[in-house]
Amino acid sequence: MKQLINAGLYQNPRTFSLIPRLLSVGEGAKKEEIGRIQSPLPLGEGWVRDNSTKFLLCAICIIALFSMRSVAQDSSNASIYRGPTVQKANELPDSIFAILSASGAKSEYFSGLKRRTETTMTTLPSRVKIMRITERNVQNGDFANPNPQANVRLSAIVLDGLGNFLPSLHNDSAHQFLLVAECVKMKSQTAPTSQALSALGIQSIREQSLYNSSDLSIALCTDKAGYMQRFGAQTEVAYQAFFSAFGANVEKIRVQYDHRIATDSLAMKGETAPNLGLTALYKASYKAASLLKYSERKHKALVILSGGADDASIVYTLRDVLEVVRASGITVYAIALGSGADTYALRTMAHSSGGRFYAVDEVSFGNASSNITRELIAVLQEIANSYKVFYEITPSVNTASNQDSSSDFCAESDIALTLTSNVQHTSTQRIREAAPYLAAQDAYFPKHQIIATFAPLSATIQDDYEGLISTLGETLKDNPTKVIELIGHTDQTGNDENNRNFALRRAQAVKRYLLLMGVNPAQIRLRSVGREKPIFYFEKEDWKSRANRRVELRWLDPSLVPFEIFAQVVSTEEDAMRLEAEWNGRGYEAYYEAFLINRIPVYRLKLWGFPTLESAEKVKRELQEKYRLRLSVQ
């Protein structure tokens, strides 16, 4: 019937009124049967006897039957979506329109909802966004050979130029959705390349809502490190508004962090830890994901906001976060706030979980805190609104298009969603967005891992960092083959020689703490660089200079520098620590280890860091000549 209408027959109201009756006539109907159809319209006597009218009615029957057959043929093709799906006649409840009204201001973010009656024939979608890919139970991201139990779903939004969600497009033949899986990076080459991998049909499209749902759990993980001060106190208002947008029945979890972690009761009261310039992004993300992991809710989402790079997680890595997120079916939304954020880590967390990454930088919001808050609120509002109403799209995979395993040649793949609109009196418009599905997992490590920071002219470990050092100590005791290096730093004041000595004292203070915990001294190396490697060259704020006064942690692989020089042997650990400090002060990498001679414990000093036997022998000869010592290389 739609095809008859589109063909222009609807323009004649009398002809249109006959269509339902004509469709009831079979293909083998006799002409006189057609003539016996009684019209409710006053067409006048003798109209059936008119040959031209009979011919028109026969033509209408033929067109109708041909249209029905054509529609049946199209519905049998599951690989290409050509219009409304079987599951199409679901309408949003009025309660959704009560909590989400139409927006009148231009926005690129999801900020409002239009009723179907508020859209006109010339309303065109402006952008389509894939907000999340859930239940991604496809073997190795391989669409060509999916798991028979796979039940992948995409949650997408379609917006106009004002940021309004446009409903019921899946029920309108003027709008057609198309899904394609694309290979964006081949395993045999490093440069990305776009290549069609598999045509994905669409099994169903439905409008869904999780507003106020008892099946939804949301965790918000927010950065409270020193650099976040410039974003203003209004960010907290944005966080509270974000939570309230989901409804009372949604489970909400709050995590705040700098180098420490604060959850729920502490964070919800607005109590924040002192801003010291460090951030345990991975540790906090892991903590929030672990809380979601044990939630009994079906749908789980983690929103992570960070303005800096991880430098205080110590024993937690990006891989740890990815593992718990994937295993628990958690969707991650990552927001990088400012140019100092680690966009690679945040983007990886979002894309690996089927979530979405946002970058809010200085170019967007300038220097005013009100502009920062406005941009952040818009992002958080879009995430919240995408759970109030969204298109749930279930793909149906066309296995015939590619029988080979895509994961054999494709390192990274995307799902691309295209919406084609043919609105009356406008040209055809296509809008498209691709979202990562299969992402390569490269090893990634943070640039800095800070175990403690210090007050000016101090080598005393403050209570704030005892938890970090204790975690490191327990890890070393549980892994006796692991070796670390503690690197001392200072701020930019003073001279180089004094700063190197002071930085070494700070590293020694951390080592003494670890030794008191029972850590084997052979697992610890010391090094001092003074003020030569600051994190911040311009220490305009106190938190920047404090971050420079630090002791960093580095995990070592002894196999990479296997050769060492055996130096002095002493009878007490106090003497061994003194010699270690002397050699470090001379610019050499030194550590000591305990061993027994005739059942008597002694301590042997070693110089390490030599990748080849030749390099170690050369340094040994130089030291023997300079210090008149008996040395050997091992």
Image (spheres, rainbow, N blue to C red):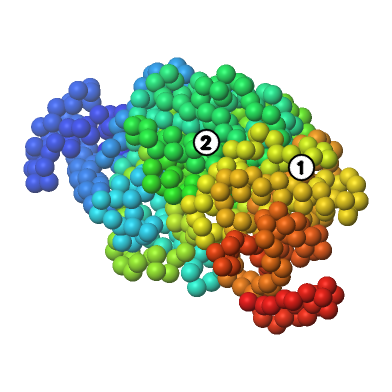
Q: Of discs 1 and 2, which sits in the foreground?
A: 1
Q: Which residue of the protein is positioned furthest toward the right in this rendering?
A: 495
Q: Tell me the residue that label 2 is attached to.
A: 303
> Mark 2 or mark 1, which is nearer the start of the sequence?
2
- Which residue: 48% across, 28% down? 253
The image shows residue 124 at horizontal and vertical percentages of 51, 37
Element type at marker 1? loop
Packing grade of label 1 (10 A; few <14, some 14-19, many >=20) is: many
Amino acid under label 2?
Val
- Which residue: 14% across, 36% down? 24
Is residue 3 shown to the viewer in this render? Answer: no
Image marks 1 and 2: residues in contact by CB distance under 8 Å: no
Packing grade of label 2 (10 A; few <14, some 14-19, many >=20) is: many
- Which residue: 52% across, 28% down? 263
The image shows residue 572 at horizontal and vertical percentages of 67, 57
148 to 229, vertically: above or below: below
Q: Which residue of the protein is positioned furthest toward the bottom in this rendering?
A: 614
- Residue 268: mark: none
Amino acid under label 1?
Ala
Is residue 276 shown to the viewer in this render? Answer: yes
- Which residue: 61% across, 56% down? 521
> In which quadrant of the rendered image does the N terminus lie?
top left
**Front residue (pair 172, 497):** 497
Q: How far apart are marks 1 and 2 (CA)?
A: 37 Å
Horizontal side of residue 365 vs 112, given as left or right: right
> In which quadrant of the rendered image does the C terminus lie?
bottom right
Horizontal side of residue 571 vs 415, given as left or right: right
- Residue 459: mark: 1
**Front residue (pair 239, 434):** 239
**Front residue (pair 272, 162):** 272
The image shows residue 85 at horizontal and vertical percentages of 30, 42
